């Protein structure tokens, strides 16, 4: 699968604050008033944390358009477990495509990119939580409903 012309994909970097990555995330939920310093501190920490095999634990990805703006973002977080002989599980989190860019297959491309990152890191499965209204999207990306999500909110 390839991106439409004019779009590129890469790992999130500090300068993406100015490219509107937080605005893109408002398509998903409330972002709040995160300062550029807070943003940079989080991105730096994500860049430093690695698995025992040397691959990054946090894998935030952005899609950029030909006007150098972030139009989609998402991440795969890799969890090291004791079970399955210290197996690795990928968690897909915080997927958002800018409202005016939805329906161009950017979301599907992003998920394929995250699946590839997970596969290269050595995960045995990839899981995610989503709203029932997005179940069809994730089915198109090859996921299957595997139960129910439970929450305890603080
Ligand atoms: N229900 C059913 N099918 C869908 C849906 C949906 N909600 N959205 C897209 N599709 C289908 C498309 O029709 C397309 O089908 P096709 O391949 O047969 O033509 C396929 O899924 C791929 O669609 P894309 O164009 O890649 O979807 P898009 O780029 O619009 O991204 C997304 C979908 C991520 C859900 C986007 O609409 C979005 O950002 N929504 C708001 C934020 C959100 O809900 N994010 C998901 C949170 S869950 C999480 O983070 C783990």
Image: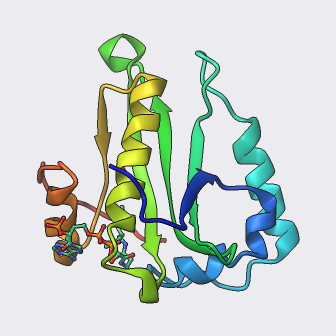
Image position, residue 104 (x, y; %): 34, 74
Left or right: 154 as drawn, with respect to 84: right
Look at 47% across and 36% down and name the residue there: 117
Left or right: 40 as drawn, with respect to 24: right
Say if 83 sits above or below 148 in the image. Answer: above
Look at 60% across and 26% down and name the residue there: 55
Quick one: 150 or 116, which is closer to the camera? Answer: 116
Residue farthest top in this picture: 85
Residue farthest right in this picture: 37
Q: Is residue 91 visible?
A: no
Image position, residue 36 (x, y; %): 84, 73
Q: Is residue 90 visible?
A: yes
Q: Please tell me how many numbered marks the rendered image carries.
A: 0
Residue farthest bottom in this picture: 100
Say if 3 sits above or below 104 in the image. Answer: above
Quick one: 66 or 144, which is closer to the camera? Answer: 66
Image position, residue 32 (x, y; %): 65, 84
Colour scheme shown? rainbow
Left or right: 96 as drawn, with respect to 151: right
Quick one: 130 or 83, which is closer to the camera? Answer: 130
View quadrant of ligand 1? bottom left
Look at 40% across and 51% down and name the residue there: 92
Look at 33% across and 19% down and name the residue there: 83
Image position, residue 146 (x, y; %): 12, 48
């Amino acid at each position: 699968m390839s991106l439409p012309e004019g779009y590129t994909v890469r790992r999130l970097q500090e300068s993406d604050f100015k490219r509107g990555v937080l605005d893109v995330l408002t398509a998903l939920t409330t972002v709040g008033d995160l300062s550029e310093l807070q943003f940079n501190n989080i991105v730096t920490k994500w860049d430093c944390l690695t698995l025992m095999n040397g691959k990054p634990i946090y894998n935030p990805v952005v899609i950029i358009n030909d006007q150098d703006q972030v139009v989609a973002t998402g991440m795969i977080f890799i969890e090291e477990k004791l079970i399955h002989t210290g197996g690795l599980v990928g968690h897909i989190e915080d997927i958002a495509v800018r409202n005016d860019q939805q329906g161009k297959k950017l979301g599907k491309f992003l998920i394929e990119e995250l699946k590839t990152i997970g596969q290269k890191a050595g995960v045995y499965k990839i899981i995610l939580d989503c709203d029932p209204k997005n179940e069809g999207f994730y089915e198109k990306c090859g996921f299957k409903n595997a139960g129910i999500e439970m929450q305890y909110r603080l």
